[in-house]
Amino acid sequence: MRIGISIKWTLSAVFIVILVVVVYAFFMISDTQKGVDRETERIRRIQYEALDQLGAQTTRTLSLPASSLMFDTDLEGLRGLLAPIVEDDKTREKSHSAVYATIIAPEGRVWVAVMSPEYDRLTMADTLFFDRHRESQVTEQVSTAFLETYENAPDFPITEEVVRSLVTRDGEKIDLAIRQYTVAIKPKSDDGHASPQGYLIVGYSIAGLTKEIEIIQQQGDQQKQEALERSLYLALLAVILGLLIAGIQSFLVTRNIKKLTKAANQIASGDLTVRSSVRSRDEIGQLGEQFNVMANRVQALLVETEQKAMLEKELDIARSIQTTLLPSDGYAECGGIALNGYFQPASTCGGDFWNFAKLADGSVLLTIGDVTGHGVPAAMITAVAKSSLDTILHIHHNQPLNIPALMEELNVAVCQTAKRTIFMTFLAVCISPDSRHAEIVNAGHNFPLLARQEDVKALVVRGERLGDNPNAKYQSVKTELQPGDLLLLYTDGITEYLNPLGAEYGEKRLRKVLSGFDRLDVNSAMQMLWSDFSAFCDNAPQMDDITLMFAKIR
């Protein structure tokens, strides 16, 4: 299923908006919770500090008169001393109030116990028990463990937070959080190390503080709920606006993209006259401009491709014609001479030329030429030279052939055709019918190489290039041949070939390879030379035509 870019764009915008709103809501709720926690802790700390200050002050203030009353065993006085604590706190609206006050003697007897009027009984598990209906003179047994707790305490007053079980006047039993303060009652002493007469304990309810904290937390929860609702409303509004904006933007963008797509499809179907009509000042507009540039270029390239295809077809035809002008590569025999020739152009058409022909007197004429450069111009000059050579040989097919005169006629033909802009080196070797000697005429070409036994030497013959001077004269040089001699005629495409390291194959290496080739036939000689040459080149690009021709004297 293909999803349009407008839908993707809209969904992406909605996703980003929702993500931003969720992050905003998270931080808002988190900040609200932190504020609630800070406020709760602040109130708790203030109330506890105030309560601790009140409890410490109250117990210390009452401990001194309680010492005298205990010494006189004045229980009513002690009761009168403690009663105002719970009655006075009851009349005031506070987050804490005194629930009970008691004085315990070290002998393990309860001397006085006073509690808030709203409660009927107080049970302190494993410590003490009393109710408001008993006379204060009546004492109850107090556990030894309770007294040991305070006897072993190093400092007073002692602050504790405990849970006490109380029974209200209606008979309802409740567990109440109590902050309890205990101070030792000591008689006056000069050294200050007298044993305690008893202990004064005052317990304050912190239910009011707990209620205030609950109210703050409820307010915090309400604020978080309100923040969440605001976030939801904001998210809804942002989604609606995001959809609207994304829809408008995607419509404006996809409209131009659809135009470009339509134009691209038309071009793909072959209509190269189509151009983009997108007009905008953003990247899509730039894309439309580049599209038109591309379309123009494609149209031009197709025309160029068509022309190139026609040219390549013509070049293929020219190569086919050139192939018919040259002998077939490989082994051949002419008179008493065994031959093997090879031609490899650097491009579609080459400028090298080689040929062999048997003359009327039984001689064998070997020719090889190299036009400057390669490609079509060089191939045209090669065709002219080959046609001229064939014409001259045909005219003199029943007459003795003068090799220097042949070279002069070829020079005139090349001069008239190339207008002294393209030149050709040419070498003609005429081997006598008895293969005892060879007549050589050279027009600026590479000297032929003669391999005899272990020796390789160049047959030095000089002369001007064809096409350079229409009045040039040429002289022939004769050399003796022996049975088994191996002649190599070649173009500079092989000696000037550069390998990937930039080294040239060179005539020196060529002579070294040919050493001892007189023992080989022309086929083996060609194979071994080409094997060494290929190993040296290592697939380096060919820059010039290569032509080789081996001739074996039997």
Image (cartoon, rainbow, N blue to C red):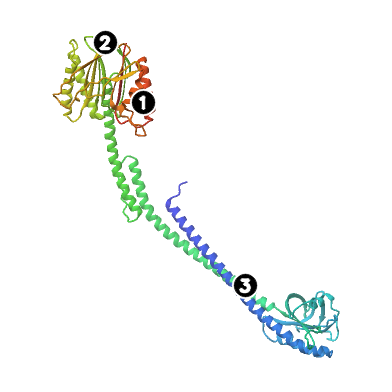
205 lies above or below 381 = below
Looking at the picture, does residue 153 appear above or below residue 541? below
Residue 108 locus on image (x, y percent): 85, 80
Would residue 127 be seen by someone viewing this image from the given angle?
no
Decide if residue 445 is on the left or right side of residue 416. Answer: right
Q: Residue at x 57, y 69 (%)?
A: 224
Which of the two discs, 2 and 1, sits closer to the camera? 2
Q: Where is residue 190 in the image (x, y as percent from the top left)?
A: 78, 88
Say what amino acid the circle numbered 2 marks.
Answer: Arg
Crowding near pointer 2: few (<14 within 10 Å), some, many (20+)?
few
| Residue tagged 1 | 533
Residue 250 showing in the rendered view:
yes
Label 2 or label 3, whichever lies nearer to me, is 2
The residue that mark 3 highlights is 217
Percent coordinates x, y for residue 376 in the rendering? 24, 29
Res. 458 image quadrant: top left
- Above or below residue 180? Residue 455 is above
- State which quadrant residue 247 falls in: bottom left
Instruction: Name the residue nearer the viewer: 228 or 508.
Output: 508
| Relative horizontal placement of residue 59, taking residue 261 as reference (left or right) | right
Which comes sooner in the sequence, label 3 or label 1? 3
- Which comes sooner in the sequence, label 2 or label 1? 2
| Mark 2, residue position | 436
Q: How far apart are marks 3 and 1 (CA)?
A: 96 Å
Say which quadrant the C terminus sits in. Answer: top left
Secondary element under disc 1, as helix, strand or loop, is helix
As drawn, the residue found furthest toward the front would be 455
Q: Where is residue 40 in the image (x, y as percent from the top left)?
A: 62, 74
Q: Distance between the residues labelled 2 and 1?
A: 31 Å
Tell me the kind of residue under disc 1.
Phe
Residue 37, image quadrant: bottom right
